[in-house]
Amino acid sequence: MDLQLKGKNALVTGSTRGIGLRIARRFADEGANLGICARTRADVDRTLAELSNKGINAVGDVADITNRDSYTGWIRACAEQLGGIDVLVSNVSAGPREGGEAGWRNMFEADMLGAVRGCEAALPWLRKSKAGAIVLISSISGVMSKPLPAPGIYAYGALKAALISYGAQLSKDLAKEGIRVNIVSPGPIYFEGGPWDFIKQGMPEAYQDALKHCVIGRLGTPEEVAAAVVFLASPVSGFTVGQNLHVDGGYMQHVAF
């Protein structure tokens, strides 16, 4: 299927490893130009070299999503170098790494304010696009009452829920301007060196529990999340607005009315 992304300009945050890297690769495979960022220069340079080899224009820099000037400066630079922005994918997350007030602050700055900053900064260019789209990466933890996979760390699920609500509300306003906003909520996604790899090694019971709840019989791959993100961001999905797509292997066993 031609997703009609060739020549479009897509910005993906946290795009040098894990799900973010796979999203960037999938956009590049569709012929889209890329703006990428990470917190280390070596990761940015390595990823730029890989993406450029696919025959597209790839630009990027070191950026801190929790720092307004750093983040908005990266967006502005990418827009100027690429000649505009058609798609923004807000992917960076602090993750369920720590409890207490510090965990709440880190999640709020990275996941929630990071998304808000990115959307607001990219809007001037998205408004000029004929295929403007925003995809926010949330989590099924945002719609679950059981913390996954870290009992007692409530910030992750709560802030992911806030992100889903923000995206749904934003979608109604921006659709009037021709900009579509959707959310992708992954379930347990396994890749080497990723969170579920560490859970498999350090918390085998939690890993087996997740495996049991994925009715498809396995954990997901970052490539499968990327496919959903790129489809929702594409003009082919032009009538889809304000949706929260679960990519979870059937983990969420409920009827989503």
Image (tube, rainbow, N blue to C red):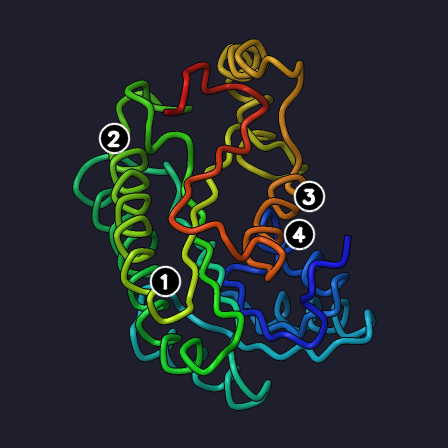
Residue located at (34% from left, 59% from top): 115
Q: Secondary structure at mark 4?
A: helix
Q: Secondary structure at mark 1?
A: helix
Locate residue 231, reporting x and y percent: 62, 51
- How many marks are shown on the rendered structure? 4
The numbered dot on residue 144 is none
Sort mark 3 into few (<14), some (14-19) or many (20+) by Cα contacts within 10 Å.
some
Say whether marks 2 and 1 touch (CB < 8 Å).
no
Disc number lying in front (3 or 1): 1
Residue located at (37% from left, 82% from top): 124
The numbered dot on residue 154 is 2
Please state which of residues 214 and 104 is positioned toward the viewer in this rendering.
Answer: 214
Locate residue 234, reporting x and y percent: 60, 59
Residue located at (69% from left, 77% from top): 7
Amino acid type of the residue tagged 1 in the rendering: Ala
Residue, disc 4: 22
Amino acid type of the residue tagged 4 in the rendering: Arg
- Determine the image quadrant of residue 27: bottom right
Locate residue 222, reporting x and y percent: 64, 41
Residue located at (28% from left, 29% from top): 153
Say whether marks 3 and 2 touch (CB < 8 Å).
no
User: Mark 2 and mark 1: span between their CA atoms?
Assistant: 32 Å
Residue, disc 3: 223
Disc number lying in front (4 or 2): 4
Amino acid type of the residue tagged 3 in the rendering: Glu
Amino acid type of the residue tagged 2 in the rendering: Tyr
The numbered dot on residue 175 is 1
